[in-house]
Image (cartoon, rainbow, N blue to C red):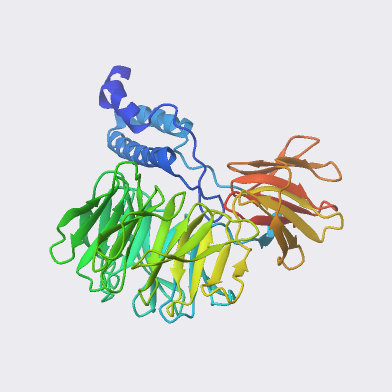
Amino acid sequence: MGGRVVRLIQRSEILAAVPPLIPRIPRTGPAAGVFFLPGTAKTRYNQITAARHRASRVIGRAMMKPASRIAALLLLIAWGLAGLWPAAAQDSGPYVEQMQLGRGMLRSVAWSPDGELIAVGGALGIWLYDADLTLRGRLTGHTKAVYDLAFSPDGARLASVSHDLTVRIWDVTTQAELRQMAGHSGLVVAVDWSPDGRTVASGAYDDTLRLWDPDTGDLRAVLDGPAGGVNDVAYSPNGAILASANGDSTVWLWDTITNRSYPASTLPAGTGRVGAVAWGPDGALIAAGWDGRVHYIGGPVSQAASWPFEAHPDVIYDMAFSPPGVTFATASWDGSVRIWHKFDLAQVRELRAADLPGRVHHLAWSPDGKRLAAVSWDDTLRVWDVTGAQPPRILYEHTDWITGLKWSDDGSQIISSSGDGWLRIWNTADGTLLDARPDTLEAGPRVAVSPDGTRQAEARSDGTTITDTATGEEIAVLPGAANAVSWSPDGARLAVALRNGIIKIWGHE
């Protein structure tokens, strides 16, 4: 019988379904941590995802025949050992969540056409703020970080894309999810609306662009792009052309009537990935390479300036024309946003944080062109007055991986430090942020014993375990990939630092 089973599921199938030595990737989401996977890590993530799907198909075929069930069971075991099987559900036991501190990491930003709302996407969904950075709501549904956002031309809807491989449409007024579209097989990182509001384009690391009907959620077309992934998409002002910035140093243009494409430009050797493309109101098209240069692709300003030109000494991750179209802004990993005059390429202004400049990765203009919103790897949201007349408004509540934390002696505050370089002080009575400054704590602790010595908490990638120190019996497993734990001075509460950038405070029932 064993021989028959081996023939039903060949060893090559198992190896293809479950590659050997695949590292375990912790689950991600609002309660489990979100990971930014650039370069080879991104590729490995896609390999693991594909392996999971292949394993599912093999198991499905095997279970159709009774004689194959033993081999299918063996495959399931191998799948689990490879880290592809979902972790068991956690049991918080006698502990209840009392409070959440922080709002998670930031990865995207968009400004509504009427200037009333700034949307930022991150690990815990999409946060809506007014221009004064007062919180107006949060859109939840994505299970992983939101990497790009775009308001519809009339501002009534918001499109979002996420590492959960979905494209979603939201009603801005009701804050309800209207549509969820799936189909991409790689990380989805770019989205834009057509000027008439009838089509949403998304770009992903699966080397495709997809065109969606935002009213029905139907997929209209799949556009096969070049190898290397699609980093950005942008419709021309008249909607006739869709541009894509690609990982193979090219910019492609797509005819929106025929969906036919052609490489509009191959940037010079050494440029690296094309991170962003931007259209001016007059039809000028420019692109930014990871070499820090801005490249002219086409349009009416071709003879008016010397292209390309070095705008930053580091990667340019995003760029956008101001609504009037006279200037454009570039966001760079050198920690600055620079504003340029499009005709003579003179630098109009540099916007840079004075306290802790982090790599700037997304920006958005206000409709009147007088302000710029920017999000950085330091997880701040900054709204700049581009005239320099007013200091920037800064939001510090969003946080990267929490790496260390401790309670104040009286238990009224929690001090945390995170991978974004900030030390934050939180009020444990109401969860408000009291202070933020560039500083750090010693990492951890990953293991902490309660003040009375009866319980031990351990932060792990698959949850936080609480055990009885006398018997070793497991009391509870609190959900979420964790980096650090800390008991309150009276032992009544446990603070858990999660990898998605929040702290949860748990209390005993």
Residue name at image x 29 percent, y 28 percent:
13
Residue name at image x 23 percent, y 71 percent:
239
Q: Is residue 131 left or right of residue 325?
A: right
The quarter of the picture where residue 209 lies is bottom left
Q: Is residue 375 left or right of residue 253?
A: right
Question: Could you tell me if residue 405 is visible in this image?
Answer: yes
Residue sitting nearer the eye, 427 or 397: 397
Q: Is residue 115 above or below residue 47?
A: below
Residue sitting nearer the eye, 352 or 496: 352
Q: Is residue 253 left or right of residue 19?
A: left
Q: Is residue 139 above or below residue 262?
A: below
Residue name at image x 71 percent, y 65 percent:
431
Q: Residue 67, image x and y in percent?
A: 30, 28
The quarter of the picture where residue 227 lies is top left
The quarter of the picture where residue 311 lies is bottom left
Q: Quadrant of the N terminus?
A: top left
Q: Residue 41, image x and y in percent?
A: 44, 39
Q: Residue 176, image x and y in percent?
A: 44, 73
Outermost residue, top direction?
A: 3
Q: Is residue 321 above or below residue 243?
A: below
Q: Residue 91, image x and y in percent?
A: 62, 48
Question: Could you tell me if residue 201 is visible in this image?
Answer: no
Q: Is residue 474 left or right of residue 126?
A: right
Q: Quadrant of the C terminus?
A: bottom right
Q: Is residue 239 above or below residue 507?
A: below
